[in-house]
Image (spheres, helix red, strand yellow):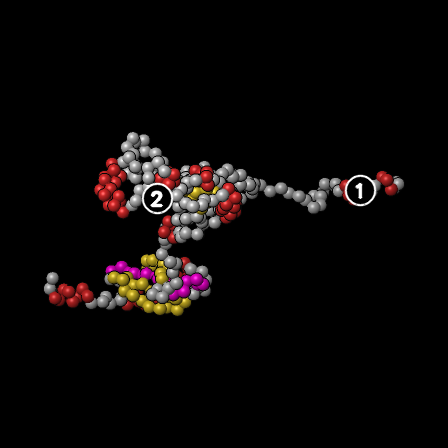
């Protein structure tokens, strides 16, 4: 490409004179497309191509600050009549525009859910996996798995050098094996007191649980706990739920249930049907010429009139 060609391609187009002068035609087209009185002053005229010019007018419609009515006019080659091409409302440089749309999965934040809200989970949610796989191989973190056996063999020497193992068969050895090597443990009263506190905050009687589609006992986000309290409580692991990281009752629930997407929707009554195709006439007085008199105007026999 030569330098002359490059210079010509970068030279701004000269607006067509007849199209530039067609301001009233453009204004009439904008007023026809808009509400009365919302088309403001003429702002500018921009050449879009050969014999194609776009006229911009201010928009005075409330809620559209900085927007402009753009009316494109054109004319055929060697013709003197300017015709309308397009009318559209476009935002200007300082126009008030709606924010960019963000999917709900990215807008949602922990704590946004309220009573009655549902948060369906995708079938391929990375936070969930099937509760059973049907395979005979133990999971990687099982004590009989190959991975754990290799880890124990590699660290066996280091562990035995630093830890003093209790005597075989002693009560201390059994307590440590069961994870109960503590001087004191919770009494029955302490267990019941804790259960009452936790159930009051995240139990079945809370408004969130009353509006939930199902309870936590069937939710995939529930992390089971050990001990006797594990029969009634667990830990919520749904980051978008109102009880994330909290101890919740198995009878508690929220809209973030892992199976909320596949649960049947509750039945709703059909909307009322209004028959607007026919009208019923209720005359206030008898039709002319019928001679009928409303019963209220007839003389009563009980009054003794002849």
- Position in image of residue 121 (x %, y %): 38, 43
Query: Can you tell which of label 2 and label 1 is closer to the viewer?
Result: 2
Picture residue at 41% right of the left edge, 45% below the top: 182
Q: Is residue 214 visible?
A: no
Q: Which residue is the site of mark 2?
A: 127
Q: Quadrant of the N terminus?
A: bottom left
- Position in image of residue 177 (x %, y %): 35, 39
Q: Which residue is the site of mark 1?
A: 298
Residue 257 as seen in the image, left or right of residue 19? right
Dominant SS type (magenta): loop
Asked if residue 68 lies in the magenta stretch, the reply is yes
Residue closer to the observer: 66 or 142: 142
Q: Earlier in the sequence, mark 2 or mark 1?
A: 2
Per the rendered image, the range of residues in magenta is 61-80
Find the residue positioned furthest to the left: 2
Assess disc 2: are there few (<14), some (14-19) or many (≥20) residues with their C-alpha within 10 Å of its C-alpha.
Answer: few
- Position in image of residue 287 (x %, y %): 70, 43
Residue closer to the observer: 255 or 139: 139
Residue closer to the observer: 228 or 197: 228
Asked if residue 164 lies in the magenta stretch, the reply is no
Disc 1 is placed on an element classified as loop
Assess disc 1: are there few (<14), some (14-19) or many (≥20) residues with their C-alpha within 10 Å of its C-alpha.
Answer: few
Q: Is residue 197 visible?
A: yes
- Position in image of residue 42 (x %, y %): 37, 68
Disc 2 is placed on an element classified as loop
Q: Name which quarter of the figure residue 236 lies in.
A: top left
Residue 247 as seen in the image, left or right of residue 12? right
């Amino acid at each position: 490409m030569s330098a002359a060609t490059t210079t010509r391609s970068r030279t701004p187009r000269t607006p067509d004179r007849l199209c530039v002068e067609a301001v009233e035609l453009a204004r009439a087209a904008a007023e026809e497309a808009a509400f009365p009185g919302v088309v403001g002053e003429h702002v500018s005229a921009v050449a879009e191509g050969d014999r194609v010019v776009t006229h911009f007018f201010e928009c005075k419609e409330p809620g559209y600050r900085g927007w402009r009515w753009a009316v494109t006019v054109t004319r055929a080659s060697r013709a003197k009549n300017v015709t309308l091409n397009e009318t559209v409302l476009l935002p200007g440089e300082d126009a008030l525009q709606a924010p960019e749309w963000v999917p709900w999965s990215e807008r949602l934040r922990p704590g946004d859910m309220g009573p009655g809200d549902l948060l369906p989970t995708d079938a391929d949610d990375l936070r969930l996996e099937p509760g059973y796989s049907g395979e005979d191989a133990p999971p990687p973190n099982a004590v009989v798995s190959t991975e754990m056996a290799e880890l124990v063999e590699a660290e066996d020497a280091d562990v035995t050098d630093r830890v003093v193992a209790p005597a075989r068969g002693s009560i201390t050895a059994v307590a440590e094996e069961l994870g109960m090597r503590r001087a004191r443990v919770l009494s029955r009263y302490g267990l019941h007191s804790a259960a009452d506190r936790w159930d009051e905050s995240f139990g079945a009687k809370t408004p969130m649980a009353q509006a939930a589609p199902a309870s936590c006992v069937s939710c995939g986000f529930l992390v089971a706990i050990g001990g006797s309290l594990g029969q009634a409580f667990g830990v919520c692991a749904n980051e978008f739920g109102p009880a994330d990281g909290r101890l919740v009752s198995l009878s508690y629930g929220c809209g973030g249930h892992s199976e909320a997407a596949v649960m049947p929707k509750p039945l709703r009554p059909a909307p009322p049907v209004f028959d607007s195709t026919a009208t019923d006439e209720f005359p206030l007085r008898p039709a002319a010429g019928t001679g009928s008199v409303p019963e209220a105007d007839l003389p009563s026999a009980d009054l003794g009139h002849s």
